[in-house]
Image (spheres, helix red, strand yellow):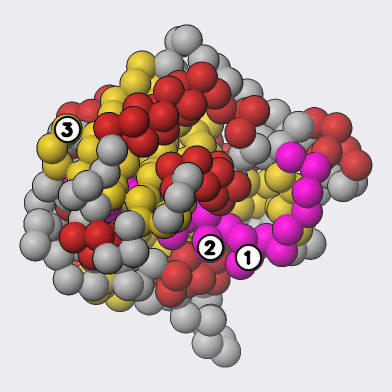
Amino acid sequence: MGEIGFSLGGESDNMAPSVGLLGIGRLGRRALARAAAVPGLALIALGAEPARQGQSGEGIGPGERSRLLEALSGLDFAVLVCSLDSAADRRLVDSVLGCLPAPDRAPMMVSVVSRGSLSQSGWRPVFRRLLAASRAAVDLWSRQGLLVQGGRVFEARERLADLVSGLAEGLAEVLARPMEMVLDPSDLRAALAFPGRLAWGLGQASGPDRARRALDRALASGAYPPENLLGAQCLLVLTIGDPGLRLGDFEYLNRRLAALAGERARLFAGLAHDAALAQAGGLKVFFLATGLPGQGTGDRAALFRAGLREWRI
């Protein structure tokens, strides 16, 4: 049976609207551990402990279903992270999808999926259900513990945990910050309403040239190389700085990201102040690009160089 745990990461003055990180299996456990300190983020673990000897792995029981529904009922947005590289993982994910609330009562959902064995086809029906349940989705290609990103190869499990916790932290930042130039839940819903691939990044820097360096770090932190942002249908950008943040920094970040996304992208931009950044003269930027064309991580040539086959759903 799966095991469900529920907790809140950190402290927050504003818990409504709320973002939850729903982790399934071992990859979910890693992502939840990375996001444990994020203020105001609800953490929900399913099957987060290694299976006990003799455990059937057939999904979740009636009591666990009611706890899951209760946890989800308080969320406006949910980031679901799971891997589909074992039959037990797929059964658990399928069981969770089967007990989600009706679409009009379910939180806005983003699914982040890792497939560890591309030679097996058992993940495909579950992946289709994930896409149907999600307003936006990204699937990160992995095999033998490796992730291909723009021709570079990473250790997948640690890297994917970083990526997902960065996405959850960025979404929580959007909703938890009092802002001067406001992003609100309707902007986030508009961004996540576009189906298909999405990209995001979160970066921070201080001192001279902080806007450029923070954005470079945000672009490097994401699942896709910057050139793959082209063609996004929606771009959401949040800039967080000390009270002395220059308007030029804010404009630079929005202008550079808009140029990478292309003229089709609808831009939502927000500006917030954080007294904690004032001492170091710091700046933080989070971006979310949705409705991106294509499937898979990186380019096709990189996938083939790594011995991977690009599956089509």
Q: Tell me residue 299's x, y (percent).
A: 76, 32
- Lateral position of residue 58 relative to residue 309, left or right: left
Main SS of residues in magenta: helix
Task: From this view, report whether residue 54 is shown above or below residue 67.
Answer: below
Task: From this view, report whether residue 225 is shown above or below residue 122.
Answer: above
Q: Tell me residue 43's x, y (percent).
A: 30, 66
Q: CA distance from mark 3 to mark 2?
A: 31 Å
- Graded by Cα atoms within 10 Å as few (under 14), some (14 to 19) or many (20 or more), the crowding at tag 1 reads many
- Lateral position of residue 310 relative to residue 262, left or right: right
- Graded by Cα atoms within 10 Å as few (under 14), some (14 to 19) or many (20 or more), the crowding at tag 2 reads many
* Residue type marked 2: Ala
Q: Which mark is residue 157?
A: 1
Q: Which mark is residue 161?
A: 2
Q: CA distance from mark 1 to mark 3?
A: 36 Å
Q: CA distance from mark 2 to mark 1?
A: 6 Å
> Would you say the residues marked 2 and 1 are in contact, meaning their CB atoms lie under 8 Å apart?
yes
**Which residue is drawn at the image coordinates 52% and 76% (left, top)?**
56
Quarter of the image with the N terminus is bottom left
Looking at marks 3 and 2 on the same chain, the residue that comes earlier in the sequence is marked by 2
Q: Secondary structure at mark 1?
A: helix
Q: Tell me residue 50's x, y (percent).
A: 53, 81
* Residue type marked 3: Met
Provide the residue span drawn in magenta: 150-175
Looking at marks 1 and 3 on the same chain, the residue that comes earlier in the sequence is marked by 1
- The question of residue 159 being in magenta is answered with yes
Quarter of the image with the C terminus is top right
Q: Which mark is residue 13?
A: none
Question: 80 or 286, which is in the foreground?
Answer: 286
Q: Which residue is mark 3?
A: 181
> Would you say the residues marked 3 and 2 are in contact, meaning their CB atoms lie under 8 Å apart?
no
